Amino acid sequence: MMHWIILPVVLPALLAPLIGFVMRHDMTLTRTASVAGTLLLFAISLGLVLLAADGETHVYRLGDWPAPFGIVLVLDRLSALMVVLTAALAVIVLIHAIASGWDARGWHFHTLFQFQLMGVCGAFLTGDVFNLFVFFEVLLIASYGLMIHAGGTRRIQAGLQYVVANLAGSTLFLFALGAIYASTGTLNLADLAVRVAELPREEAGLVRVAAMLLLVVFAVKAALFPVQFWLPGTYSNAPAPVAALFAIMTKVGAYAILRVHATAFGPEVPATGDLVGDWLFPAAIVTIAIGAFGVLGARRVMPLISFSVIGSMGTLLLAIASFSPGATTAALYYLVHSTFAAACLFLVADLVVTRRGSDLLNAMPATAQNGLFAALFFGAAIGMAGMPPLSGFLGKLLILDALRAPEVMPWAWTAILVGSLLTIVGFARAGSELFWKSTSIPLPVASPGEAAVDAAVVPATPGATPLEIAPAVLTIAALVGLAAFAGPVAGYLEDTAIQLFDRAQYIGAVLTTGGEG
């Protein structure tokens, strides 16, 4: 039995309580264990990518019970890609949290961080819709604690909104699971795909209702219109490292839409047809518009970045809505890019806001290392906006090329191009206020004959240490690497998309009782 597949779930699940109950009074030991565990998770995820590169679908059967009777974890190129992306982001965010001291501003940061990784990795690896719900709840419970880390009235209020929105989504998830089980008698994804394909369309009304309920649930996680309202407040008020880690949270929703609907409710399935894509496409268009106008109208740094995340999710889901290998290849490339771009913006914003003392977009005296912060912000901004030479430009170009069908091209191209323009203008305005205009405002100095200005009046703005700057540099380096190696990366992602839509291989690998366990 290939036990490596379950390690991304088991490792953080074992490490979290160990940190929480044994090491919590020793911050040095806690940090060491958390960093070591996260680095080990990254190494394991790289091994899983190599394992999945053979193009086969690998199945881990808990208790050696065959599907659909037992719980299964499934590893293919797509799940391996998402796990390694999660682990890479986790390493970067953890370095920033430790270097900036964010992890020491509240209790149990590292415990919740590991539980969060457990839930996210489990959601990417599970082959069962019910266990997808279970892992959703694990990652959401952990994210509730991370969201309110370090306390504060605004953070608690935003956390309450986040909890309410996601509890509503969880309730709908249970309704959808009940409808699916009542109509098909299974919740295993491969078995569900077989049974839904056998249902006549006139007898599949309940299945279509369940498919739409699942779309709404996953849309909540992905911040898709009209259920995107929770994201700006949550991401804007969360601690910056947490917001950076949350860059992968919306991708869990996008992954769930892609995995579940492409496997069980795809356009070629008579019972559901293109029902999901017909609703997903216009919702993605509106999501892009909300994100773009939000960026243009933002008056604070953190909401500016939060709305750019909404816009990027609209672009991603616009490509996913086609449910075709070509568009999915473009979507996966953009998914990887947008995760690093969003994380970079939050990390750079933390460096800047911490030293300014406010995230308001107005001119203030320049901080130490103003030029360095401006360069980092500029790099992250052009990545998120989709300007050359970074990978955002190539990602949007791939999506535009994939959406050339006459019935979708006018809407998709207009939304992406106009949304990108508004995002560029919004970030340019923000950068001007934060860095350029700030250089023209002198620090107050004592006039002749007066006492020197009290140090308490002019807050000290010490420069960031190399360890604080390194995570933001790593994320920009990832964007540069994606652009420099776009050919090989796109080739791997094309194979990933082809494997995703090979439903027969997935079903055969999961439901077979022989071979790898």
Image (cartoon, grey):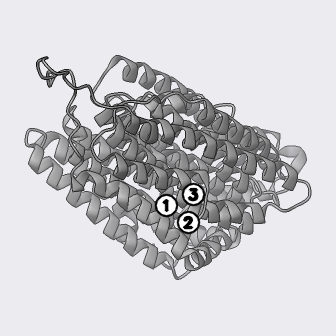
Looking at the rendered structure, the secondary structure element under dot 1 is helix
Residue 177, can we see it? no
Q: Residues within 10 Å of mark 1 (few under 14, many from 20)?
A: many
Which quadrant is the N terminus positioned in? bottom left
* Near-viewer residue (319 or 127): 319
Vertical relation: 289 (above or below) 481: above
Marks 3 and 1 sit apart, C-alpha to C-alpha, by 10 Å
Badge count: 3
For mark 1, what is the residue?
82
Q: Earlier in the sequence, mark 2 or mark 3?
A: 2
Q: Are marks 3 and 1 in contact (CB under 8 Å)?
A: no
Under mark 1, the amino acid is Met
State the residue lying farthest toward the left. 26
* Near-viewer residue (421 or 515): 421
Q: Earlier in the sequence, mark 3 or mark 1?
A: 1
Q: Which mark is residue 172?
A: none
- Residue 383 in the figure: left or right of residue 110: right
Under mark 2, the amino acid is Leu
Quadrant of residue 509 within the rendered picture: bottom right
Q: Are marks 1 and 2 in contact (CB under 8 Å)?
A: yes
For mark 2, what is the residue?
78
Marks 2 and 3 sit apart, C-alpha to C-alpha, by 12 Å
For mark 3, what is the residue?
335
Under mark 3, the amino acid is Leu
Marks 1 and 2 sit apart, C-alpha to C-alpha, by 6 Å
Q: Residue at x 11, y 18 (%)?
A: 451
Image location (x, y in percent) of residue 517: 45, 72
Image location (x, y in percent) of residue 390: 55, 64
Residue 115, can we see it? yes
